Image (cartoon, rainbow, N blue to C red):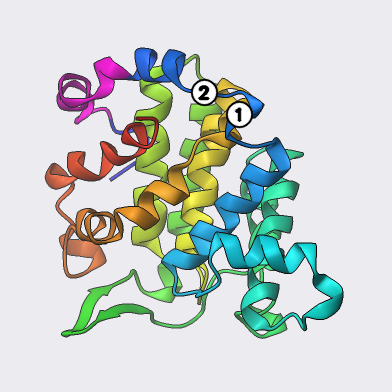
Amino acid sequence: MRITERKYFDTYFKSIGHEIPKLISDFDFSENRGGFEYLTKTSAIYSSNIEGNSIDLNSFMNYELNKEKFKAGKEIEEIEDLIEAYQFAQANSLNEKNLLYCHKIFSDTLLIRSKRGKYRTEKIGVFGKAGLAYMAVEPEFVEKEMKLFFQDLSGLIASDLNEIEVFYFASLIHLRFAHIHPFRDGNGRAARLAEKWFVAEKLGRDFWKIPSEEYYKNEQARYYGSIHLGVNFYELNYDKCVGFLEMLPNCLK
């Protein structure tokens, strides 16, 4: 599947796509929901929480108010690194070099130095309570898949897309990235960052404020369930992907 695939667009449009322009016009982009810096931090916190980080929004913000009284542990550092990656993304264009650099930033507590900002050279699976849930593409094919991914991404960035198309392709970017699973660790964080980065690059800086990570955290069971489209990279059934694609617009409600 290519991230430029339009096969599911008509179904998407009928299910939720037609609502997107109104959802955007009704969404509160003002300071009432928090300043830009604050919302960037919330994005990083919720994205980290999805991956098992136990530091919630309230705890992190109180830590920031009283840094001199607390020792920053690994989980705090993990969130701070992801905030730094979001800030870098907000100041730079979305491309392979910059996404790899973001991974290098936020994987400081996740991986040894030689694995940060680089594609994996190991087999990788996603495991759940019942055992192996998904086996990603073999490491020798990762670079080829990512070359094609960024080739298509560059084309989408250069294309004239409306708001509905931007949200549709952003979700496909997120989904395909998660399925390729190009890193040893940090794939979910990178996929969610790339999704929002694409939306903001196409529609404007204010779109960094949309609460996609918070929505995915609150709907975590649905989030993981709708990403799961097959037991391995070669048996993915994208005919079932619309349930996942619907999630990003729903974060605006």
| Residue at the farthest right position | 68
- In the image, residue 86 sits, relative to residue 120, either above or below, namely above
**Residue 243 falls in which quadrant of the image?**
top left
Label ID, residue 55: none
- The residue to which callout 2 is attached is 28
- In the image, residue 221 sits, relative to residue 214, either above or below, namely below
- The residue to which callout 1 is attached is 32
In this picture, residue 131 sits left or right of residue 218: left
Identify which amino acid the numbered label 1 is placed on. Asn
Identify which amino acid the numbered label 2 is placed on. Asp
Q: Position of residue 223 (x, y in %)?
A: 28, 55
Residue at position x 44%, y 50% in the image: 214
Q: Give the magenta-colored segment's residue range.
A: 6-19
**Residue 64 falls in which quadrant of the image?**
bottom right
Q: Position of residue 2 (x, y in %)?
A: 33, 42
Crowd class of label 1 (few under 14; some 14 to 19; many from 20; radius 10 Å): few
**Residue 235 falls in which quadrant of the image?**
bottom left
Q: In terms of secondary structure, what is the magenta stretch mainly? A: helix
Q: Position of residue 81 (x, y in %)?
A: 70, 66
Say what secondary structure mark 1 lies in: helix
Q: CA distance from mark 2 to mark 1?
A: 8 Å
Crowd class of label 2 (few under 14; some 14 to 19; many from 20; radius 10 Å): few
